Image (cartoon, rainbow, N blue to C red):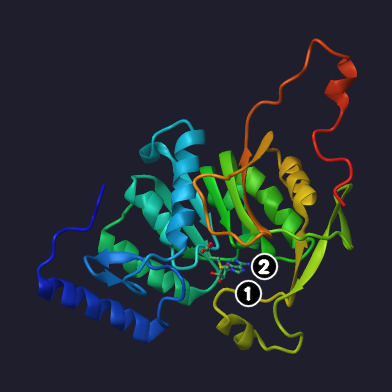
Amino acid sequence: MWPLKKREPEETAALRRRMEEVASRHGPWTGHNIRLADGLYTIRDEVMGLGLRARRFLQCAADIVGKPFDQMRVLDLACCEGYYAIEFGLKGARAVGIEGRDVHVERAEFVRREFGLDNVEFHVGDVRDLSRERHGEFDVVLCAGILYHLDAPDVFRFVESIGEVCTRLAIFDTHVSAGGEVAHTYKGRTYHGSDFREHDDAAAREQRLANPWASLDTPKSFWPNRRSLYNMIDAAGFTSVLECHLPAGFEPDDRIVLMGIKGAPVRVEATHPGFNDIPRGWPDPK
Ligand SMILES: C[S@@+](CC[C@H](N)C(=O)[O-])C[C@H]1O[C@@H](n2cnc3c(N)ncnc32)[C@H](O)[C@@H]1O
């Protein structure tokens, strides 16, 4: 499915005016550079980073999920201006984007309408309210750029809820801490990492919302270190956690892309049976 139909110059000009009207009402696009027509982009006509991330997510989903895109249900958490959900939607997947800032959703909705994607939905919502009861189940859950905006214990509950709604693949694109000076215990397991300041404690709600890519409210977030993050994904019911190295992305050293895969736990047979009783997670995630 490819919606970029050939447009006459006056059609493209009219589309540009509609885009500018959305931007004047809700603010300009902040990061998701989407190609609306030949030479017309939501931000600018150049190669920008998020296309690399989208290529990774689509490739990993195609390689791991084991069904064609048009049979996948995809959830894009904290979807911002909706680019990843749109890409999956263009491949025929049924995609749902949830985003806390309504202005991002207005911009995402504009693109969805212009592309005529009836298989994509965007909703204003807080990802901390995610549950199977409210949102259903998904073959693919994209957790991109959101984990590091949540504080403890929300971040633990949130990963747990991803495990609840995901039937096959959850993609975690996130910063991790290199340290372990802060520890939290949740449901009997201890996780280590660092605190990260998001907003000034005194900042008003409006000031917090005005920073378009930050947490909605919480003044600081908790970044788990690598092993603690693996353990969080393990505790959420995923049987394998793999790191994506190809296709390449453009991550700084503290950012990783992990694939949580839901499968059936296997047993080892030709060794001491005690190995089957050893917990799957890392014993010391410090
Ligand atoms: C760093 S941006 C990442 C956007 C997008 N997922 C991506 O990877 O390009 C963080 C996004 O999370 C949204 N956000 C932050 N806290 C949220 C929450 N509790 N619920 C829903 N959205 C939230 C922000 O509004 C922003 O759009």
Using a 10 Å C-alpha cutoff, classify the residue at mark 2 as few (fewer than 14 neighbours), some (14 to 19) or many (20 or more): many
Asked if disc 2 is less than 8 Å from ligand 1, the answer is yes
Amino acid of disc 1 = Leu
Find residue 62 and report its image quarter: top left
Whether pointer 1 and pointer 2 mark residues with C-beta atoms closer than 8 Å, the reply is: yes
- Point out residue 214 in the picture as x, y percentages from the top left corner: 61, 74
- Which x, y percent locates residue 177? 76, 61
Q: Quadrant of ligand 1?
A: bottom right
As drawn, the label of residue 216 is 1
Kind of residue indicated by mark 2: His
Element carrying mark 2: helix
280 with respect to 124 (left or right): right
For residue 156, the mark is none
Q: Name the residue rendered at 55%, 48% in the picture.
A: 141
Q: Mark 2 = which residue? A: 149
Residue found at x 62% / y 35%: 262
Residue 221 locus on image (x, y percent): 74, 69
**Among the 4 quarters of the image, the one containing residue 233:** top right
For disc 1, the neighbor class at 10 Å (few under 14, some 14 to 19, many from 20) is many
| Residue at image point 34% right, 46% down | 91
Ligand 1 has an atom within 8 Å of the beta carbon of the residue at disc 1: yes
Percent x, y of residue 73: 45, 43
